[in-house]
Image (cartoon, rainbow, N blue to C red):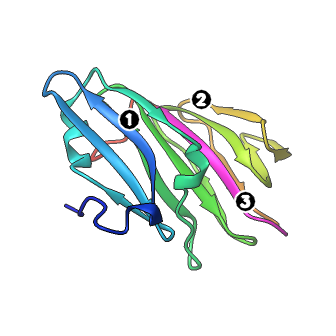
């Protein structure tokens, strides 16, 4: 478990609060110098009735120079929501999810998506749906970064 902001509070930014009514726990996510710190985030897995407000969700994206970055926003018994973050030239190769529908919402940037046999350029505000068993992929041909909201239902196992 990471620490709560200390003496230098002005260098932290409150990114979101997660309220779990069953356990009366408030989980706060803090951002400090580009590092997301999560406090007791594992508790959210046991809360089916989470009410979340994530301010500027795209700011919680995690970029990785080696491969597409991932950040979990919410994981419940019934759905998963997260961010996929792509540097220019990165991709999430063609794959399928049996028994799970998935949608993407482009939050920032531009990219290319394939769903089934359809390939298209996408940009901020575009929505993409991949039905269960339908092959899909995302890529960022550049020049800027790409951040995509990903929602799956039911959630992947192990999330």
The magenta span reads: 143-152
Residue underneath mark 2 = 131
Please tell me whether the stretch drawn in magenta is mainly helix, strand or loop.
strand
Label located before the other in sequence (2 or 1): 2
Q: Measuring from the top left, give residue 56's x and y in whole percent.
A: 59, 43
Residue 22 spot, x, y in % from top left: 15, 22
145 or 138: nearer the eye? 145
Query: Secondary structure beneath disc 2?
Result: loop
Classify mark 1: residues with Cα within 10 Å, few (<14), some (14-19) or many (20+).
Answer: many
Give the structural element (helix, strand or loop) at label 1: loop
Q: CA distance from mark 3 to mark 1?
A: 22 Å
Residue at 85% in and 69% down = 143
Residue highlighted by disc 1: 155
Local SS, label 3:
strand
> Which residue is denoted by mark 3 in the rendering?
139
Above or below residue 22? Residue 107 is below
Q: Is residue 4 above or below residue 151?
A: below
Magenta-drawn stretch contains 150: yes
- Tell me residue 40's x, y (percent): 21, 49
> Gap between marks 2 and 3, in whole Å?
19 Å
Task: Judge from the rendering whether residue 77 lies leftward or rightward of residue 63; answer left or right.
Answer: left
Q: Earlier in the sequence, mark 3 or mark 1?
A: 3
Q: Nearer the viewer, residue 146 or 95?
A: 146
112 displayed left or right of 130: right
Mark 3 neighbour class, 10 Å CA radius: few under 14, some 14 to 19, many 20 or more: many
- Tell me the CA gap for discs 2 and 1: 14 Å
Residue under the point 23% across and 63% down: 3
Q: Describe residue 40's horizontal placement relative to residue 96 as left or right.
A: left
Q: Nearer the viewer, mark 2 or mark 3?
A: 3
Q: Nearer the viewer, residue 9 or 37?
A: 9
In the rendered image, residue 87, in percent from the top left (x then y), is placed at 68, 69
């Amino acid at each position: 478990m990471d620490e709560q902001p200390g003496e230098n509070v002005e260098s932290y930014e409150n990114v979101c609060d997660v309220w779990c009514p069953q356990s009366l726990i408030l989980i706060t996510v803090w951002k400090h110098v580009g590092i997301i710190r999560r406090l007791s985030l594992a508790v959210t897995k046991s809360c089916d009735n989470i009410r979340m407000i994530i301010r500027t969700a795209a700011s919680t994206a995690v970029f990785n120079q080696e491969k597409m970055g991932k950040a979990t926003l919410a994981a419940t018994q019934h759905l998963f929501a997260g961010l996929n973050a792509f540097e220019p030239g990165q991709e999430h190769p063609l794959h399928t999810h049996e028994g799970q529908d998935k949608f993407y919402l482009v939050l920032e940037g531009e990219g290319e998506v394939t769903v089934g046999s359809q390939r298209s350029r996408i940009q901020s505000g575009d929505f993409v749906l991949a039905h269960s068993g339908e092959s899909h992929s995302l890529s960022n041909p550049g020049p800027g970064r790409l951040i995509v909201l990903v929602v799956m239902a039911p959630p992947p196992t192990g999330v």
